[in-house]
Image (cartoon, helix red, strand yellow):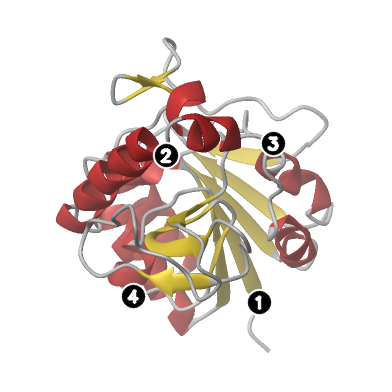
Amino acid sequence: MKKKIVILTGAGISAESGLNTFRDADGLWEGYDVNDVATPEAWDRDPVLVQHFYNLRRKAVLEALPNAAHKALVALEARYEVTIITQNIDDLHERAGSSHIVHLHGIITRSQSSANPALTYPVEGWELKMGEKCELGSQLRPHVVWFGEPVPMIEEAARLAAQADIFMIIGTSLLVYPAAGLVNFVPRQARKILIDPKAPKVAGVSGIESVKMKAGEGVPQVVRELLL
C-alpha cells in the first residue's frame, strides 16, 4: 500500500509563476484594500468593482504557467498517494498534472451563484460579466471564499491531514486560519516538512524539518529525496 503524502500549499508556490499574494505588509492586493474586494460586504456594496477585480485576477491566472514546484509534485504520484490541499485560487496544480487537489478557498476559473454557493459553473475565458446569472436567476460571482465566509472544505482537509504519513507545507506563512490549523491534525509520528524561505515556527508542533528555500528550488530537492 502506498504511503500517503498530504501537501498544504500557499501563495509562495504560485508567486514564482508571477501571481502575487495579498498578504503583504500594507494589506493591499494589487493595489486594492482586501476589504473592498474580498468580503461579502464588498460584493453587496459594489459588485461591479469586485467582479472587475477578479476578472483581472482570472486573466493573470490564465496567463501564468505552472513552475518547477508545481511540476515536481506530480512526480510523487508514481510512488505515493498524494493529496494537495491548496489555499490558492489558481489552477496551476491542475495544469501541472496533479490528480487530487482540494481547494480550500475556491478556484477562480469557476463562478458560483450569489443565491446558492453550491451551484458552480466553469468560466469561459477570463471575464465573468454582470448580468450572467445562475439557474436560479441570481448574478454569478467568483467561486472564491471571501473573508468572513465559511470554508466548506476545511473538514475534508482536516480528515486528510489526519491520515498523512508525510505532511508537506509549501509557501505559506501559516497565518491564515483555519488552514494554518491543519498541521495540528497531522499524526505525531508523521514526517513533517516545511518549505519556505522564511520557514515560520509552528507553535505546538515538534519535529518539523525546515527547508529555507523558495518553492521552485526547495520542492524539487525534497521530491528527489522522497523518490530515492
Marks counted in the figure total: 4
Instruction: Estimate the spatial distance between the alpha carbons at disc 3 and disc 2, rounded to whole Å.
Output: 26 Å
Q: Is mark 3 on a helix, strand or loop?
A: loop
Q: Which of 168 and 161 is in front in this view?
A: 161
Q: Which mark is residue 47?
A: 2
Q: Please, what is the three-letter code of the amino acid marked with disc 4? A: Gly
Q: Which one is earlier in the sequence, the residue at label 1 or at label 3?
A: 1
Judge the density around disc 1: few (<14), some (14-19), many (≥20) Cα neighbours within 10 Å: few
According to the image, label 4 marks what residue?
Answer: 97
Q: Which residue lies furthest to the bottom in this view?
A: 1
Looking at the rendered image, the disc whose residue lies closer to the viewer, 3 or 4, is 3
Q: Is mark 4 on a helix, strand or loop?
A: loop
Residue drawn 31% across and 37% down? 53
According to the image, label 1 marks what residue?
Answer: 3
Q: Which one is earlier in the sequence, the residue at label 2 or at label 1?
A: 1
Residue drawn 80% across and 62% down? 162
Q: To which quarter of the image does residue 202 belong?
A: top right
In this view, 206 is above or below 162: above
Instruction: Estimate the spatial distance between the alpha carbons at disc 1 and disc 4, rounded to whole Å.
Output: 20 Å
Q: Nearer the viewer, residue 113 or 109?
A: 113
| Residue 195 at least partly seen | yes
